[in-house]
Amino acid sequence: MQVKRQFQKKTEEELQRTRNDFRSVNTDRSTNTSLKIWNDYCIGLGLFKPNTLEPIDMYNLNKVDLNLHLESLVSQLKKKNGGELQASSISTYVNGWQRYLKERYIKENFNKERKGDVVNLFYDGEFDSFRNQLKSKYNDLLKKGLMKIEHTKAITKRNIWKY
Protein backbone atom coordinates (compact mmCIF):
# COMPACT_ATOMS: atom_id res chain seq x y z
CA MET A 1 0.00 0.00 0.00
CA GLN A 2 1.38 3.39 -1.01
CA VAL A 3 1.07 6.20 1.52
CA LYS A 4 0.23 9.65 0.19
CA ARG A 5 2.58 12.22 1.67
CA GLN A 6 1.02 15.37 2.99
CA PHE A 7 4.14 17.51 2.63
CA GLN A 8 6.42 17.72 -0.36
CA LYS A 9 9.72 19.46 -0.83
CA LYS A 10 9.40 22.75 -2.70
CA THR A 11 12.04 24.12 -5.02
CA GLU A 12 13.63 27.48 -4.29
CA GLU A 13 11.83 28.95 -7.34
CA GLU A 14 8.44 27.82 -5.99
CA LEU A 15 9.20 29.27 -2.58
CA GLN A 16 10.35 32.58 -4.08
CA ARG A 17 7.21 32.78 -6.22
CA THR A 18 5.08 32.30 -3.10
CA ARG A 19 7.05 34.96 -1.24
CA ASN A 20 6.60 37.40 -4.08
CA ASP A 21 2.86 36.72 -4.30
CA PHE A 22 2.36 37.79 -0.70
CA ARG A 23 4.80 40.69 -0.64
CA SER A 24 3.06 44.04 -1.02
CA VAL A 25 4.44 46.31 -3.72
CA ASN A 26 3.48 49.36 -1.64
CA THR A 27 5.42 48.05 1.37
CA ASP A 28 8.55 47.66 -0.75
CA ARG A 29 8.03 51.09 -2.26
CA SER A 30 7.66 52.81 1.13
CA THR A 31 10.72 50.97 2.52
CA ASN A 32 12.77 52.05 -0.51
CA THR A 33 11.56 55.64 -0.17
CA SER A 34 12.57 55.62 3.50
CA LEU A 35 16.03 54.33 2.57
CA LYS A 36 16.33 57.00 -0.12
CA ILE A 37 15.66 59.67 2.53
CA TRP A 38 18.36 58.07 4.73
CA ASN A 39 20.83 57.97 1.80
CA ASP A 40 20.12 61.62 0.91
CA TYR A 41 20.80 62.56 4.54
CA CYS A 42 24.10 60.62 4.52
CA ILE A 43 25.20 62.17 1.23
CA GLY A 44 24.34 65.65 2.53
CA LEU A 45 26.54 65.11 5.58
CA GLY A 46 29.29 63.22 3.74
CA LEU A 47 28.67 59.98 5.61
CA PHE A 48 30.16 57.38 3.27
CA LYS A 49 31.49 53.87 3.60
CA PRO A 50 35.30 53.91 3.84
CA ASN A 51 37.04 54.51 0.50
CA THR A 52 33.75 54.80 -1.41
CA LEU A 53 31.13 57.35 -2.28
CA GLU A 54 28.38 55.00 -1.12
CA PRO A 55 26.27 56.20 1.84
CA ILE A 56 26.70 54.31 5.11
CA ASP A 57 24.19 51.56 5.81
CA MET A 58 22.06 52.25 8.89
CA TYR A 59 22.14 48.54 9.71
CA ASN A 60 25.91 48.64 10.28
CA LEU A 61 25.81 51.53 12.76
CA ASN A 62 25.77 50.91 16.48
CA LYS A 63 22.58 51.91 18.29
CA VAL A 64 24.05 55.08 19.82
CA ASP A 65 25.26 56.47 16.47
CA LEU A 66 22.07 55.42 14.68
CA ASN A 67 20.02 57.20 17.35
CA LEU A 68 22.00 60.43 16.90
CA HIS A 69 21.68 60.35 13.12
CA LEU A 70 17.96 59.52 13.14
CA GLU A 71 17.34 62.26 15.71
CA SER A 72 19.14 64.77 13.49
CA LEU A 73 17.41 63.49 10.35
CA VAL A 74 13.90 63.73 11.83
CA SER A 75 14.53 67.28 13.02
CA GLN A 76 15.46 68.29 9.45
CA LEU A 77 12.76 66.45 7.48
CA LYS A 78 11.04 68.75 4.99
CA LYS A 79 9.56 68.55 1.52
CA LYS A 80 11.91 69.18 -1.41
CA ASN A 81 10.41 72.66 -1.82
CA GLY A 82 11.16 73.43 1.86
CA GLY A 83 7.60 73.03 3.15
CA GLU A 84 6.60 70.88 6.10
CA LEU A 85 5.84 67.21 5.59
CA GLN A 86 2.59 65.67 6.74
CA ALA A 87 2.92 63.62 9.93
CA SER A 88 1.77 60.54 8.01
CA SER A 89 4.78 60.87 5.67
CA ILE A 90 7.19 61.00 8.60
CA SER A 91 5.47 58.02 10.15
CA THR A 92 5.85 56.13 6.85
CA TYR A 93 9.59 56.86 6.82
CA VAL A 94 10.08 55.70 10.41
CA ASN A 95 8.11 52.51 9.77
CA GLY A 96 10.18 51.91 6.62
CA TRP A 97 13.44 52.26 8.55
CA GLN A 98 12.20 49.86 11.22
CA ARG A 99 11.04 47.35 8.58
CA TYR A 100 14.43 47.54 6.82
CA LEU A 101 16.37 46.98 10.05
CA LYS A 102 14.19 44.02 11.01
CA GLU A 103 14.26 42.37 7.57
CA ARG A 104 18.00 42.88 7.25
CA TYR A 105 18.55 41.34 10.70
CA ILE A 106 16.45 38.30 9.80
CA LYS A 107 18.25 37.91 6.47
CA GLU A 108 21.69 38.11 8.09
CA ASN A 109 20.91 35.88 11.08
CA PHE A 110 18.64 33.23 9.63
CA ASN A 111 20.02 29.75 10.42
CA LYS A 112 22.62 31.25 12.79
CA GLU A 113 22.74 31.52 16.51
CA ARG A 114 21.35 34.91 17.41
CA LYS A 115 24.20 37.26 18.17
CA GLY A 116 22.05 40.12 19.41
CA ASP A 117 18.59 41.55 19.35
CA VAL A 118 17.01 43.14 16.36
CA VAL A 119 17.07 46.94 16.53
CA ASN A 120 13.70 48.33 17.56
CA LEU A 121 13.34 52.07 17.04
CA PHE A 122 10.06 52.09 18.97
CA TYR A 123 11.13 50.31 22.18
CA ASP A 124 14.92 50.16 22.59
CA GLY A 125 16.18 52.49 25.31
CA GLU A 126 19.03 53.65 23.09
CA PHE A 127 16.49 55.44 20.87
CA ASP A 128 14.81 57.57 23.55
CA SER A 129 16.16 60.86 22.20
CA PHE A 130 15.12 59.88 18.65
CA ARG A 131 11.58 59.15 19.87
CA ASN A 132 11.53 62.44 21.83
CA GLN A 133 12.59 64.31 18.68
CA LEU A 134 9.85 62.50 16.76
CA LYS A 135 7.24 63.51 19.38
CA SER A 136 8.49 67.09 19.22
CA LYS A 137 8.18 67.08 15.44
CA TYR A 138 4.64 65.67 15.66
CA ASN A 139 3.65 68.30 18.25
CA ASP A 140 5.02 71.04 15.99
CA LEU A 141 3.05 69.66 13.04
CA LEU A 142 -0.08 69.42 15.19
CA LYS A 143 0.23 73.11 16.11
CA LYS A 144 0.63 73.98 12.42
CA GLY A 145 -2.44 71.93 11.50
CA LEU A 146 -0.48 69.35 9.50
CA MET A 147 -1.42 66.44 11.72
CA LYS A 148 -4.83 65.08 12.52
CA ILE A 149 -5.73 63.15 15.61
CA GLU A 150 -8.87 61.17 15.02
CA HIS A 151 -10.67 59.97 18.10
CA THR A 152 -13.26 57.24 17.89
CA LYS A 153 -16.49 57.55 19.76
CA ALA A 154 -16.67 55.75 23.07
CA ILE A 155 -18.77 52.61 23.09
CA THR A 156 -21.61 52.79 25.55
CA LYS A 157 -23.55 49.96 27.16
CA ARG A 158 -26.54 50.97 25.06
CA ASN A 159 -24.50 50.41 21.86
CA ILE A 160 -23.36 47.02 23.06
CA TRP A 161 -26.88 45.83 23.90
CA LYS A 162 -28.19 46.90 20.47
CA TYR A 163 -26.25 44.06 18.88
Image (cartoon, grey):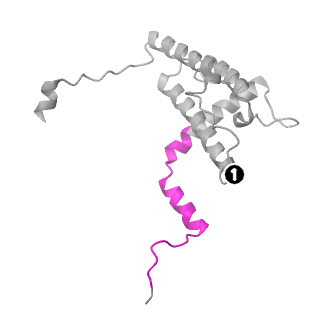
Main secondary structure type of the part rendered in magenta:
helix
Residue 77 in sight from this viewpoint: no
In the image, farthest residue toward the right: 51
In the image, farthest residue toward the top: 143
Q: Is residue 99 above or below residue 121?
A: below
Dividing the picture into quadrants, the one containing residue 101 is: top right
Question: Residue 65, percent across and down?
Answer: 73, 24
Q: Residue at x 45, y 17 (%)?
A: 146
Dividing the picture into quadrants, the one containing residue 55 is: top right
Q: Is residue 151 above or below residue 38?
A: above
Q: Amino acid at mark 1?
A: Lys
Q: Residue at x 67, y 30 (%)?
A: 38
Residue 128 vs residue 96, the one in the foreground: 128
Question: Residue 19, percent across and down?
Answer: 53, 57
For label 1, the crowd category at 10 Å Cα-Cα, with few meaning under 14, some 14 to 19 and many 20 or more, is few
User: From the image, which quarter does the C terminus lie in?
Assistant: top left
Question: Residue 60, percent across and down?
Answer: 74, 36
Q: Is residue 40 above or below residue 77?
A: below
Residue 82 vs residue 141, the one in the foreground: 141
- Left or right? Give the position of 36 relative to 95: right
Question: Residue 7, percent across and down?
Answer: 48, 71
User: Is residue 120 in the magenta section?
Assistant: no
Q: Residue at x 22, y 25 (%)?
A: 155
User: Is residue 28 in the magenta section?
Assistant: yes
- Left or right? Give the position of 65 relative to 14: right
User: From the image, which quarter does the N terminus lie in?
Assistant: bottom left
- Left or right? Give the position of 136 relative to 38: left
Residue 19 vs residue 9, the one in the foreground: 9
SS at badge 1: loop
Span of residues in magenta:
3-30
Question: What residue did someone put label 1 on?
Answer: 112
